[in-house]
Amino acid sequence: MLLKDTGKRLEPSPEGLHHAVCVDVVDLGLQDTPWGPKPKLQLTWELDLVNEKGGRRFVVARWFGANLSEKGHLRPFLEAWRGRKFTKEELAGFDPEVLVGVNCQVQVVHKIKDNGDVSAQVQAIVGAPKGVPTIRPSLEFVRVKDRTQHPTTEGSGQAEESDVPF
Protein backbone atom coordinates (compact mmCIF):
# COMPACT_ATOMS: atom_id res chain seq x y z
CA MET A 1 0.00 0.00 0.00
CA LEU A 2 1.30 3.46 -0.88
CA LEU A 3 0.43 6.39 1.33
CA LYS A 4 0.46 10.03 0.34
CA ASP A 5 -0.34 13.44 1.74
CA THR A 6 -3.93 14.28 0.82
CA GLY A 7 -3.35 17.98 1.45
CA LYS A 8 -6.34 18.07 3.83
CA ARG A 9 -5.78 19.88 7.11
CA LEU A 10 -7.97 19.82 10.18
CA GLU A 11 -9.33 23.17 11.22
CA PRO A 12 -7.97 23.95 14.69
CA SER A 13 -10.48 24.75 17.39
CA PRO A 14 -10.86 28.49 18.02
CA GLU A 15 -8.71 30.22 20.61
CA GLY A 16 -10.32 31.31 23.85
CA LEU A 17 -12.03 29.98 26.95
CA HIS A 18 -14.52 27.23 26.07
CA HIS A 19 -17.02 25.07 27.95
CA ALA A 20 -15.90 21.47 27.44
CA VAL A 21 -16.41 17.89 28.57
CA CYS A 22 -13.67 15.32 29.07
CA VAL A 23 -14.31 12.53 26.58
CA ASP A 24 -11.22 10.35 26.93
CA VAL A 25 -8.25 9.43 29.07
CA VAL A 26 -5.64 7.47 27.11
CA ASP A 27 -2.69 5.58 28.57
CA LEU A 28 0.07 6.34 26.06
CA GLY A 29 2.52 3.96 27.71
CA LEU A 30 6.22 4.80 27.80
CA GLN A 31 7.20 7.75 25.62
CA ASP A 32 10.72 8.94 24.87
CA THR A 33 11.65 12.17 26.65
CA PRO A 34 14.95 14.03 27.10
CA TRP A 35 15.15 12.26 30.50
CA GLY A 36 14.52 8.78 29.09
CA PRO A 37 11.27 6.84 28.61
CA LYS A 38 8.45 8.09 30.84
CA PRO A 39 4.80 6.98 31.21
CA LYS A 40 2.40 9.44 29.58
CA LEU A 41 -1.33 9.91 29.34
CA GLN A 42 -3.56 12.02 27.14
CA LEU A 43 -6.66 13.88 28.24
CA THR A 44 -9.17 14.71 25.49
CA TRP A 45 -12.10 17.14 25.55
CA GLU A 46 -14.95 18.03 23.24
CA LEU A 47 -15.76 21.72 23.15
CA ASP A 48 -19.30 23.04 23.21
CA LEU A 49 -18.65 24.41 19.73
CA VAL A 50 -19.48 22.73 16.44
CA ASN A 51 -17.05 22.94 13.53
CA GLU A 52 -19.31 24.16 10.73
CA LYS A 53 -17.13 22.47 8.09
CA GLY A 54 -17.36 19.00 9.62
CA GLY A 55 -20.60 19.25 11.58
CA ARG A 56 -18.97 17.84 14.72
CA ARG A 57 -17.73 19.38 17.93
CA PHE A 58 -14.15 20.57 18.08
CA VAL A 59 -11.85 18.17 19.96
CA VAL A 60 -8.69 19.18 21.85
CA ALA A 61 -6.20 17.09 23.80
CA ARG A 62 -3.12 17.43 25.96
CA TRP A 63 -0.37 14.99 27.01
CA PHE A 64 0.90 14.71 30.58
CA GLY A 65 3.36 12.66 32.55
CA ALA A 66 1.33 9.85 34.10
CA ASN A 67 2.00 10.76 37.74
CA LEU A 68 0.82 13.15 40.41
CA SER A 69 4.24 14.54 41.30
CA GLU A 70 4.20 18.03 42.75
CA LYS A 71 6.76 19.02 40.11
CA GLY A 72 4.80 17.50 37.21
CA HIS A 73 2.23 19.20 34.99
CA LEU A 74 -0.74 16.92 35.63
CA ARG A 75 -1.25 17.52 39.35
CA PRO A 76 -1.51 21.34 39.23
CA PHE A 77 -3.66 21.03 36.10
CA LEU A 78 -6.13 18.71 37.86
CA GLU A 79 -6.07 20.87 41.00
CA ALA A 80 -6.99 23.93 38.91
CA TRP A 81 -9.83 21.92 37.33
CA ARG A 82 -11.22 20.62 40.62
CA GLY A 83 -10.64 23.91 42.47
CA ARG A 84 -8.77 22.33 45.38
CA LYS A 85 -5.59 20.44 46.18
CA PHE A 86 -5.36 16.66 46.43
CA THR A 87 -5.40 15.14 49.91
CA LYS A 88 -2.74 12.60 50.94
CA GLU A 89 -5.34 9.85 50.61
CA GLU A 90 -6.24 10.92 47.07
CA LEU A 91 -2.56 11.09 46.09
CA ALA A 92 -2.12 7.47 47.21
CA GLY A 93 -4.25 6.32 44.28
CA PHE A 94 -6.17 8.41 41.78
CA ASP A 95 -7.99 6.78 38.83
CA PRO A 96 -8.06 9.27 35.94
CA GLU A 97 -11.02 7.40 34.41
CA VAL A 98 -13.27 9.42 36.74
CA LEU A 99 -12.50 12.46 34.54
CA VAL A 100 -14.53 11.12 31.59
CA GLY A 101 -17.83 13.00 31.42
CA VAL A 102 -16.67 15.82 33.73
CA ASN A 103 -17.33 19.37 32.51
CA CYS A 104 -14.83 22.22 32.67
CA GLN A 105 -13.61 25.30 30.86
CA VAL A 106 -10.44 25.00 28.79
CA GLN A 107 -8.26 27.83 27.55
CA VAL A 108 -7.23 27.05 23.96
CA VAL A 109 -4.30 28.81 22.33
CA HIS A 110 -2.88 28.46 18.84
CA LYS A 111 0.68 27.44 18.09
CA ILE A 112 2.20 27.86 14.66
CA LYS A 113 4.27 24.85 13.65
CA ASP A 114 7.49 25.04 11.64
CA ASN A 115 5.60 24.11 8.44
CA GLY A 116 3.10 26.96 8.97
CA ASP A 117 0.21 24.78 10.15
CA VAL A 118 -1.72 25.96 13.19
CA SER A 119 -2.46 23.62 16.09
CA ALA A 120 -4.81 24.22 18.98
CA GLN A 121 -3.38 23.53 22.44
CA VAL A 122 -5.02 23.41 25.84
CA GLN A 123 -3.08 25.89 27.95
CA ALA A 124 -5.20 26.00 31.10
CA ILE A 125 -8.31 24.57 32.72
CA VAL A 126 -10.82 25.59 35.39
CA GLY A 127 -14.02 24.05 36.71
CA ALA A 128 -17.28 24.27 34.82
CA PRO A 129 -19.10 27.60 35.10
CA LYS A 130 -21.93 27.71 37.65
CA GLY A 131 -25.43 27.82 36.23
CA VAL A 132 -24.43 26.59 32.78
CA PRO A 133 -26.09 23.36 31.60
CA THR A 134 -23.86 20.29 31.71
CA ILE A 135 -22.73 19.01 28.34
CA ARG A 136 -22.26 15.34 27.61
CA PRO A 137 -19.85 13.62 25.23
CA SER A 138 -21.35 13.54 21.75
CA LEU A 139 -22.42 10.26 20.22
CA GLU A 140 -19.88 10.78 17.41
CA PHE A 141 -16.88 10.53 19.74
CA VAL A 142 -15.57 7.02 20.39
CA ARG A 143 -12.97 6.53 23.11
CA VAL A 144 -9.59 5.25 21.94
CA LYS A 145 -9.91 2.07 24.03
CA ASP A 146 -13.20 1.27 22.28
CA ARG A 147 -12.13 1.98 18.70
CA THR A 148 -10.41 -1.30 17.89
CA GLN A 149 -12.78 -3.55 19.84
CA HIS A 150 -16.11 -1.89 19.10
CA PRO A 151 -15.80 0.70 16.30
CA THR A 152 -19.46 1.71 16.62
CA THR A 153 -19.46 2.27 20.39
CA GLU A 154 -21.09 5.54 21.32
CA GLY A 155 -19.56 8.05 23.72
CA SER A 156 -20.80 7.93 27.29
CA GLY A 157 -21.08 10.55 29.99
CA GLN A 158 -20.83 10.01 33.71
CA ALA A 159 -21.32 13.44 35.25
CA GLU A 160 -24.85 14.43 36.17
CA GLU A 161 -24.11 17.78 37.78
CA SER A 162 -21.62 20.60 37.31
CA ASP A 163 -19.78 19.68 40.53
CA VAL A 164 -16.42 18.12 39.81
CA PRO A 165 -16.52 14.56 41.25
CA PHE A 166 -12.78 14.05 41.57
Image (tube, grey):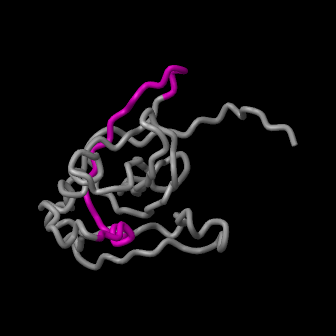
Quadrant that contains the N terminus:
top right
- Residue at the right extreme of this rendering: 1
Residue drawn at (85%, 38%) of the image? 2
Q: Quadrant of residue 115?
A: top right
Q: Position of residue 41 (x, y in %)?
A: 43, 54
> In screen coordinates, is 128 left or right of 52?
left
Task: Please indicate, yes or no, whether residue 149 appears anywhere in the rendered image.
Answer: yes
**Residue 153 lies in quadrant:** bottom right
Q: Nearer the viewer, residue 57 or 82?
A: 82
- Name which residue lies at 24% across and 57% down: 78
> Is 112 in front, or is 95?
95
On whether residue 118 falls in the magenta region, the answer is no
Q: Where in the figure is residue 17, as x and y percent of width and height?
A: 25, 46
Please give the name of the residue rendered at 29% of the width and 52% of the height, measured from the top-left corner. 74
User: For the image shown, how many numbered marks are present on the structure?
Assistant: 0
Query: In front here: 150 or 68?
Result: 68
- Asked whether residue 58 is in view, the answer is no
In which quadrant of the rendered image does the C terminus lie?
bottom left
Q: Nearer the viewer, residue 1 or 96?
A: 96
Counting from the top left corner in percent of width and height, residue 58 is at 44, 51
Instruction: Where is residue 65? Give x, y as percent.
Output: 38, 49
Q: Residue at x 51, y 50 (%)?
A: 30
Q: From the viewer's perspective, is 60 left or right of 106?
A: right
Residue 103 is one of the magenta-drawn residues: yes
Q: Residue furthest front?
A: 36
Q: Magenta stretch: give its range.
A: 93-117
In the image, residue 14 above or below residue 155: above
Relative to 83, is 112 on the left or the right?
right
In the image, is residue 31 above or below residue 136? above
Q: Quadrant of residue 152?
A: bottom right
